[in-house]
Amino acid sequence: MSSELKLAVIDVKPGGAQESQSGLAMLRPRIFGAYREAEGPKKCAAIVMHPVSNFMGHYLIEPLAKRGVTCMGLNSRYVNNDTMLLNERVIQDLGAGVKYLREQGYEKVVLLGNSGGASIVSFYQAQAEKFTATHGADGRPSDLSPEDFPKADGISLFGAHEGRSHLFLKWIDPAVIDESDPLSADPAVDIYSPANPAPFSKDFLERFHAAQKARRDKIENWVLARLRLLESDPRGPQDQAFVIYRTHAEPRCLDATLDANDRPPKLSIWGDPKAVNYGPNSVGRFTTLHAFLSQWSSRSQADGPTNLAKTSVPMLLFTYTADASTFPSTRDAWMKAAGARGRNVDIRGGNHYLAGQPELVTQVADEMAAWIKGL
C-alpha cells in the first residue's frame, strides 16, 4: 500500500521580468508537486516532470508508490503556459524538486523523462555532472549555479521526445508563405494538399525537409535581428511576443510507412493532424524572442540525446511502439547517446499517453520499479 497523495510546495528562485501575469508568483515564486510515499524506509524516490504539462496527476505516481518507489509529479513555474518558458529555468525548478526529496531523506533519486520531459531531465543531469550553462541560448547570463543541480542516480525515459528544438524542426509547416497569414500555402511543399498524397516520395521529402529548415532558419534569424534591435536601447523593451502559425506538419503522421511502428495511420497524438496544424493553439504557437531561442531554435541547450551522452548514470528507456510522435529512429537516438549504460524495453501497442491501456501502465511500473530499486 502507499500513502495518500501529498502536496509539495517548493520555493524557487525568481525568474525574469513579467515571467508570469501573477504578481504573487513573481514576488514569491513557488512550484508545486504531488507525490505518494512508498511504505518503509526512504530508500528511493522518482520525479517525473515536463517543461509545461501538469504532471501532478501522472499515471505512474500511484503505481510506483505501490511498488516501493515514492513518486512525485512536479510542475515547473511555466505549467500550462510556455509563452515565456526558458529551459534553463525549468531545470533549475527540477533541481529544487531533487533537493526537496533529498531533504526528505531519500537515499536515491531518479529522474523520469516522459514525452517532452525527456530532454529536460537529460539537460538537468548533464548540468549536475558538469555545469556549463552559465548563459542562456540568447547569450544572456543564466543566473544558474552548480548548487542548483544536485546529482540524480539514474534516468528513465518513456514516450520520449528528443527535445523541443527537434520537434519544431520536424513539425513546422514549410508551406507557409506569409508568416502573418495562417492560410497561406505553397502547394509544392504542402503535405495537406491533395496534390501531394501519402506515401511520400523520397524526392518530395527531401524538398519538404529542406523547406522546413529554411522556414525555421528564417524565423530564427528574424528573432536574432529583432533582439539586436531591442537591445540597442537598454532603456526600451527587451523582449516581445509573436505568433508562429502552422507547426504540426509531420509527414510521419500521414505516412505510416515512414519510420514504421505500430501507430495508426493519419493520426497525431492530438487527433487529426491537419486540424492540429491549422488550430489556434499548438507547439510553439505563442512565444517570445528569448523563449523561442531557448525552446524551439537551433541554439537550444536542451537537446536530449546530446545531453544524455554527457551523463554517466544508468538509463532505462521505454519505447511505446504505437506512439504517433516518437518512432524507431527516436529510440535509436536515445540508445546511441546512452551507450552501454542504456537498456530499452518495448511496450507493444503503447500509445503516447498509454491512454486506455492500464495493463501497459502496469507493465511499465513493474519494470521501472524493479530497475530503480536495483540501482
Image (cartoon, helix red, strand yellow):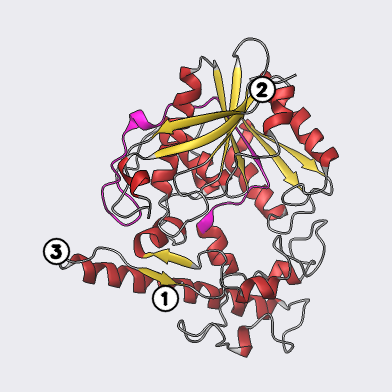
Q: Quadrant of the N terminus?
A: top right
The secondary structure type at the circle numbered 3 is loop
In contact (CB < 8 Å): disc 3 and disc 1 = no
The answer to which image quadrant residue 139 occupies is: bottom left
Marks 2, 1: nearer the viewer: 2
Residue bearing mark 3: 235
Residue appearing at x 82%, y 62% in the figure: 264
Q: Which badge, 2 or 1, is on the more N-terminal residue?
A: 2
Q: Which badge, 3 or 2, is on the more N-terminal residue?
A: 2
Looking at the picture, tell me which residue is in the foreground, 343 or 68: 68
Q: What whole-number distance in Å separates the C-alpha atoms at marks 3 and 1?
A: 28 Å
Magenta part of the protein: which range? 135-164
Whole-percent x, y for residue 76 in the image: 48, 43
Which amino acid, mark 2? Val
Marks 3, 1: nearer the viewer: 3
Residue appearing at x 33%, y 50% in the figure: 136
